[in-house]
Image: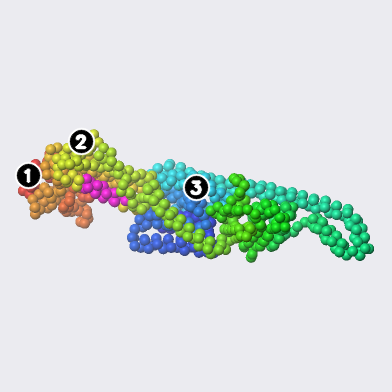
Amino acid sequence: MKLLIEGIIFLTYAIICGGLAKSRFNKKHTILTYIILTGSIVLIQAIFLFLCKDLMLVLTLLPLTVYFPFSIGLYFFSDFGFGPMTIVWMIAYLAVFILRIFSKIFYLFYSMKGTSLYADTWLLLLYLPLAASFLFLVFRFLRKPLHEYMEKNQTEWLILSCPVLISYLLLSYFCNSVTNTTALILALLTAMAIFFMIIRFLNVQAVAMRMKESEERINFQMQMQRQEYENICRKMDAGRIYRHDMRHHLLVLKTLAVEENSQEILKYIENMNGQLSETERGAYCMNPIINAVLSACFGRAKEEHCVVLPNIILPQAVPFDEMDLCMIFANTLENAINACKEIPEEGKRYIHISAEIIDHKKLILSIKNPFDSVINFDDDGIPISSKGEGHGIGFKSIRAIADKYHGFFHCKCENNEFCFQAVLFTETSKQPAAKKKNVLWKKAVTTISLSIFVVFFYLNFVPEVVQAASAIREELSLQFAGIHAWNIEWGDTFFNAAYPNFEIKGAEKKRMLPSEELSVETGDDTEDLNQQIQAYVKEMKEKFLWYVSRKYRGYAGMDISWETLRDDEEIFSIVMKCTLNAGGSGQYSRYFMLDKGTGKILELQDLFLEESDYIGIISKEVLRQMKEQIDNKKANYYVSGYGWAEQDCFRRIDSDQNFYIDEDNRLVIVFDEYEVAPGNMGMPKFSIEKEILEEILKQPSLIR
């Protein structure tokens, strides 16, 4: 059931990401790509579960083994850059946070009833409509405005991504808090508020951008219509004058006909045709808005005595934004007219323009004109204006439009002729193969770089993923007054450790404590003591990480501290104390003793003669004390014959048994919690009198 719940959460994340991200392929290939990507990840998880056979480990590692690779794969196959994809990931994971926090609150309230029966089933039934609601909101109110916002604000994605990223970190922290119901409810309300605020923000921005575009379009159309109206008025005036003078023209033609002067008649008629053409309205394409722009530009060109040779094949309904095409035509023709004005000889001024839409999917535009100066190009291949700053903006606008339609343009100069060529596409799948290959190469490099960055960022700054990856950095220790300290906390999951450090200065060893300093004349084994203490801390850290990697919806915490037990002329001893919290609590300890006389770190076998049965003798005495306490109803231990399973009962101590020598010089055997007794017994200790050990002790002995 837990797998089904997590499957719904992941599918919600995947569908939201797929819906918000802009694909580089057509619809069929996009769906196939997402199916293959999602199916591969699910198959890998199934193999992982089959091999490790630990469901809690698999569920806990989902952020690193499922969500991260899916996000990277989605980025590679999308047409969005890193900035827009960051917003997509965060919005999708915001929905995941809402589902997860909702489940935590559900389990907390459900547990108040004193039973967990059918909890997963009820949660699954609640998840289905909740996840469906998120998908409806995303596809109905979020997808289109997000695409519009990203398309119009390609360099302003930080405005949206920064708040979303901060919200992600905040919710990640609270999502790891499972003990404070109020905090979880507030986090749930905050996440939902952020989600709806993003929807509202993007929709408001989309409306504002549409209004701005509509205003620009209306202003542009009004400007073109005003110019067209002025041209029509001029042509009407010319026609009126022509009609007024018609009787004079007829009289002249009649006179020339009587004189039979045919050459003059033809010359006069040709002159009349030229005047008549000025009264005609140009029709260069079927689209009225683009035709108005062309008419205005061609009219200006003729005023500058430029010969215009158009070859324009555009339908009435073009598959591109009319405003974008008008901007390209207006900017390029204006540049061509300005270049022609610089040509001294009017007979050499010309503009050759051709434009055609092929298969209703691709626009090919070419404009040629003479030039009489040196043209320099910048690194992007855009001509550099010789008029200084503030000019040359037209080509930048053309570049933006070409990028919008996944097209390109090229400028070149040959034999005193400037040539502008551009190609626009209505579908990304119709891009040239070379451009596709270049995009894929850039995506591959960016994906690898992004993966390295994300892994580094997560493993260093997001402890939740550090825990899931079971990898806490080794260099987190900080030394202060001779104490090493580790401190990691994220939500209710934490790891705190403090342990002493010993420094060696020549032949003299100094033990650095927070408030005192003690010289210890020992051998080189003081460094071994540091290593053993660090090894124990590492052992406890691995135990902590084992629980963390399987916490799933739970938490894990560990506190490690230390205490000086004895510090006199003979022995220096400390105890490392560890408390592990993972649903329940467990206590562990490790004692370290330094024999100041020999400078050696003592082990249990160092106290006894070689080949002596110290393990059997001590075990017998410990078992005797256990039974005595049980019979006197003072304690409870795992001892055979008292109702415990035989495999759990105590039989003998280990060769590396935890022990210390107390201030009365007695041997004390120590067990960890739950090792030989139930948890209510804590960490049992058993003092062994010298009389029991006298025959097997090494002499001189520290046990007296």
Q: Residue at x 79, y 55 (%)?
A: 278
Secondary structure of the residue carrying numbered label 1: loop
Dot 3 alpha-carbon crowd within 10 angstroms: few under 14, some 14 to 19, many 20 or more: many
**Which amino acid type is shown beneath numbered disc 3?**
Ser
Q: Nearer the viewer, residue 203 or 675?
A: 203
Q: Which mark is residue 517?
A: 2
Main SS category, magenta section:
helix
Q: Position of residue 654 (x, y in %)?
A: 17, 52
The colour mode here is rainbow
Whether label 2 touches label 3, CB < 8 Å: no
Could you say which is closer to the camera, residue 137 or residue 576?
576
Is-magenta flag for residue 456?
A: no
**In the rendered view, would you say 609 is above or below 435?**
above
Give the residue pinned by disc 1. 700
Question: What's drawn in magenta, residue-wise?
Answer: 530-545
Of the numbered discs 1 and 3, the one sitting upstream in the chain is: 3
Observer-nearest residue: 243 or 197?
Answer: 243
Residue 161 tag number: 3
Tell me what residue is drawn at x 43 percent, y 42 percent: 183
